[in-house]
């Protein structure tokens, strides 16, 4: 064979070996690349040479479909028929959110409600009630939290049952184990329907100041059903109701002078008001005359008293319609909770 042909053959042989070697190297790289990614090693660096930032280990990482924490905790519920039923926290919270908040609300508002309800439940579990010593909590909203069985809720929702069932399930699962804490302890996560521009400081309702239950702005308004209501009572009705509860009140004169000038707290809620010489809180007047809230004005027209009322509920803590308004404007459930519960944090309860 001529020398030139030998050189060409040698070059072809070396080229073939190089091609095979390169192919093998590429195969190895392609094989191990997914393993590197799965193992979590950084595949790139920022332009300034620093590694990509990772989530802080202390920040709760919640998967939308995870409910491992809630499924591992049992709640003993006293139902409306007096029976004590054991439910997982997940199943119980579904019934609470379905009963306490309209399922048509924004999902972030529903998540905020789930966190508040979970926190309230844990506080009840940590301190037994003499009203139901054999259960952690009851289904009476005037005592604890409202609760509705899944079948009953779905029957009430009709054609929306499938959508609303999944929506509430996502809200509970998406906040699995999370609650509201103040200085490391779960709070009394009180909530109510709607506020008249601002929530009410706890001291104005119950006489005790609570650091995280302060008055804050609340963005709901006339989109709330029955946001503005009226209660009309005759002088005889006001006299009868008042003297039954406060026999020391003097309602003998002209009805125009029975009510004195009200004192307002933060916002438009009545802090106190004289009635027949007895000074009552706004909450006492609300209860006495079955008003929807303590944000009211009262007037006398010569034949009857008219109470003009705004909002619904005791006004302390998280406003549900306010939470929905915040969610509609883009706030997440953490933002909502830390807005209504001053100085609190959202973190795992267990």
Image: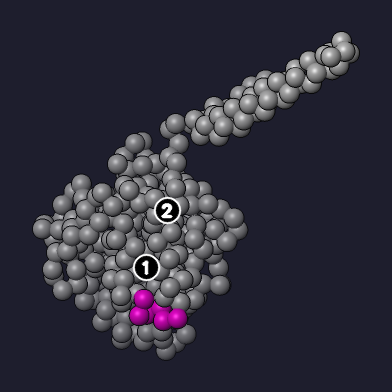
Say if residue 108 shows up in the picture: yes
Q: Nearer the viewer, residue 218 or 202?
A: 218
Mark nearest the camera among 2 and 1 is 2
The structure residue drawn at horizontal position 34% and vertical position 74%, both measured from the top left corner, is 153
Q: Can residue 344 be seen from the camera position used here?
A: no
Percent position (x, y) of residue 83?
13, 68
**Which residue position holds label 2?**
65
Residue at which label 1 appears: 98
Dot label at residue 303: none
Quadrant of the rendering where the N terminus is positioned: top right
| Quarter of the figure with residue 27 | top right
Q: Is residue 104 above or below residue 213?
A: below
Q: Quick one: SS at disc 1?
A: helix
Binning the other alpha carbons within 10 Å of mark 2 as few (below 14), some (14 to 19) or many (20 upward) gives some
The residue nearer to you, when weighing 208 against 165, is: 165
Whole-percent x and y of residue 68?
Answer: 32, 48
Q: For mark 2, give the secondary structure.
A: loop
Q: Is residue 110 left or right of residue 92?
A: right
Q: Main secondary structure of the magenta part?
A: helix
**Would you place residue 206 above or below residue 251 in this image?**
above
Task: Answer with the quarter of the image where residue 287 lies.
Answer: bottom left
Name the residue located 49 percent from the left edge and 76 percent from the top edge.
Answer: 225
Sequence-earlier tag: 2 or 1: 2
Q: For this view, does 141 lie left or right of residue 329?
A: left
- Across and down, in percent, residue 24 comes to 63, 26
Q: Hey, which residue is sitting farthest front in the picture?
A: 1
Q: At which x and y percent is residue 48?
A: 70, 22
Colouring mode (rainbow / by chain / secondary structure / one colour): one colour
Furthest-top residue in this view: 3
Determine the CA span between mark 2 and mark 1: 18 Å
| Residue range corresponding to the magenta coloring | 154-159
Q: Residues within 10 Å of mark 1 (few under 14, many from 20)?
A: many
């Amino acid at each position: 064979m001529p020398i030139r042909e030998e050189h060409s053959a040698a070059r072809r042989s070396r080229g073939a070996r190089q091609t095979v070697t390169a192919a093998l190297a590429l195969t190895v790289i392609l094989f191990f690349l997914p393993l590197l990614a799965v193992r979590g090693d950084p595949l790139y660096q920022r332009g300034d040479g620093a590694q990509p930032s990772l989530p802080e280990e202390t920040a709760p990482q919640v998967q939308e479909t995870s409910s491992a924490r809630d499924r591992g905790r049992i709640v003993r519920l006293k139902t409306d028929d007096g029976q004590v039923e054991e439910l997982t926290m997940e199943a119980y919270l579904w019934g609470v959110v379905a009963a306490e908040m309209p399922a048509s609300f924004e999902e972030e508002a529903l998540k905020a409600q789930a966190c508040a309800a979970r926190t309230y439940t844990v506080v009840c579990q940590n301190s037994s009630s003499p009203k139901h010593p054999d259960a952690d909590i009851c289904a009476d909203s005037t005592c604890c939290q409202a609760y509705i069985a899944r079948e009953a809720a779905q029957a009430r929702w009709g054609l929306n049952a499938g959508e609303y069932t999944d929506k509430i399930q996502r809200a509970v699962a998406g906040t699995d184990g999370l609650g509201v804490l103040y200085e490391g302890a779960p709070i009394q996560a009180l909530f109510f329907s709607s506020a008249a521009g601002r929530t009410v400081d706890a001291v104005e309702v119950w006489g005790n100041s609570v650091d995280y239950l302060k008055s804050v702005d609340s963005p709901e308004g006339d989109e709330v059903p029955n946001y503005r209501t009226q209660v009309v009572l005759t002088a005889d009705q006001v006299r009868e109701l008042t003297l039954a509860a406060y026999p020391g009140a003097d309602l003998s004169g002209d009805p125009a002078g029975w009510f004195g000038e009200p004192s307002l707290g933060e916002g438009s809620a009545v802090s106190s008001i004289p009635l027949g010489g007895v000074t009552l809180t706004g909450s006492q007047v609300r209860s006495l005359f079955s008003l929807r809230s303590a944000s009211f004005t009262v007037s006398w027209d010569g034949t009857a008293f008219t109470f003009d009322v705004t909002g619904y509920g005791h006004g302390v803590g998280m406003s549900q319609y306010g939470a929905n308004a915040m969610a509609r404007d883009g706030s997440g459930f953490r933002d909502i909770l830390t807005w209504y519960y001053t100085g609190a944090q959202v973190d795992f309860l267990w």
